[in-house]
Image: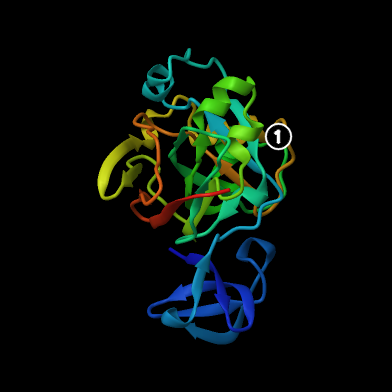
């Protein structure tokens, strides 16, 4: 299994593949054909950034029954899609900034899918072949604005509302996998991928029948029950075993 990251080094932001205690620098993102350059960077000498640079971030709402129920919503008959702007992305350790416009900002721990090649109208049986890998995502949401606006662009789109990372892995146990979210070390969410209303294969197929997907695009698969507000000073963690731990502090923004 390969593990990729996007690093901030003394030479700027670069993609790399993990090798024990070092990173092998790549000429480009792996899903863009990046190859090892022969340069290595020690883990202690680099900072992890969000590991993708997507042209679009496509998210799925209410993909766990218990989460739909906890918010008083019907179970969707087909995937409920929305966008987050790429400008909302932050990496591991970067702060989630609570906007003054909202009085309730929730965490939503999720599994992210990284598209590996340009594709359109993918059959479910071929879905895995178009994915470069998997990562952790926190779909931060201004819950009060989501309810007030009647559409989700503002509630989901504030700067810092899409932590992603810490890395991308090219293989994951989807049958037994799960996502866990903790705030200040206390577990708030835990959901198994097999409990999704719409499977990963079906999501990739459904989304690709609407949008042409480009290498590096990020698909975010929905959150389990247990969403709750974040406050200034919190530390929120999203963990997917096999990928790692995405940790971000929370602070009051402008």
**Residue at (66, 51) in percent of width and height:** 87
- In the displayed structure image, the side of residue 143 where residue 178 appears, left or right: left
The answer to whether 120 is drawn above or below residue 66 in the figure is: below
Would you call the spot at circle 1 few (<14 residues within 10 Å), some (14-19), or many (20 or more)?
some
* Residue 123 in view: no
**Residue at (46, 65) in percent of width and height:** 3
Q: Which residue is nearer to you in this view: 165 or 141?
A: 141
Q: Secondary structure at mark 1?
A: loop
Find disc 1 in the rendering and name its residue.
121
- In the displayed structure image, the side of residue 168 where residue 205 appears, left or right: right
Q: Which residue is nearer to you in this view: 120 or 249?
A: 249
**How far across and how far down the image is residue 141, in percent?**
51, 36
**Residue at (65, 57) in percent of width and height:** 53
Q: Residue furthest left?
A: 186
**How far across and how far down the image is residue 88, in percent?**
61, 48
**Residue at (59, 40) in percent of width and height:** 126
The answer to whether 128 is drawn above or below residue 64 in the figure is: below
**How far across and how far down the image is residue 108, in percent?**
44, 38
Query: Would you identify the image quadrant in which residue 226 lies?
Result: top left
The answer to whether 111 is drawn above or below residue 26 in the figure is: above
Q: Which residue is nearer to you in this view: 134 or 100?
A: 100
């Amino acid at each position: 299994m390969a593990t990729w990251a996007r690093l901030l080094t003394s030479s700027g932001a670069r993609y790399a593949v993990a090798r024990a205690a070092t990173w092998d620098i790549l000429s480009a993102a792996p899903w863009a054909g990046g190859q090892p350059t022969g340069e290595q960077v020690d883990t202690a000498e680099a900072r992890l950034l969000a590991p993708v640079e997507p042209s679009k971030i496509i998210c799925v709402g209410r993909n766990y029954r218990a989460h739909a129920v906890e918010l008083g919503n019907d179970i969707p008959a087909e995937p409920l899609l929305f966008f987050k702007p790429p400008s909302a992305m932050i990496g591991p350790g970067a702060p989630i900034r609570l906007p003054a416009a909202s009085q309730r900002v929730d965490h939503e721990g999720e599994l992210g899918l990284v598209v590996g090649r340009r594709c359109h109208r993918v059959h479910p049986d071929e879905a895995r072949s178009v994915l470069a890998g998997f990562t952790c995502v926190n779909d931060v949401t201004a819950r009060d604005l989501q309810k007030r606006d009647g559409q989700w662009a503002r509630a989901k789109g504030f700067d810092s509302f899409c932590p992603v990372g810490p890395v991308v892995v090219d293989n994951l146990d989807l049958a037994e996998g799960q996502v866990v979210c903790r705030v200040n070390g206390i577990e708030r969410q835990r959901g198994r991928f097999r409990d999704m209303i719409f499977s990963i294969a079906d999501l990739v197929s459904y989304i690709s029948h609407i949008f042409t997907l480009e290498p590096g695009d990020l698909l975010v698969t929905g959150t389990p029950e247990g969403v709750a507000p974040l406050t200034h000073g919190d530390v929120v963690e999203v963990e997917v075993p096999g990928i790692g731990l995405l940790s971000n502090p929370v602070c009051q923004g402008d």
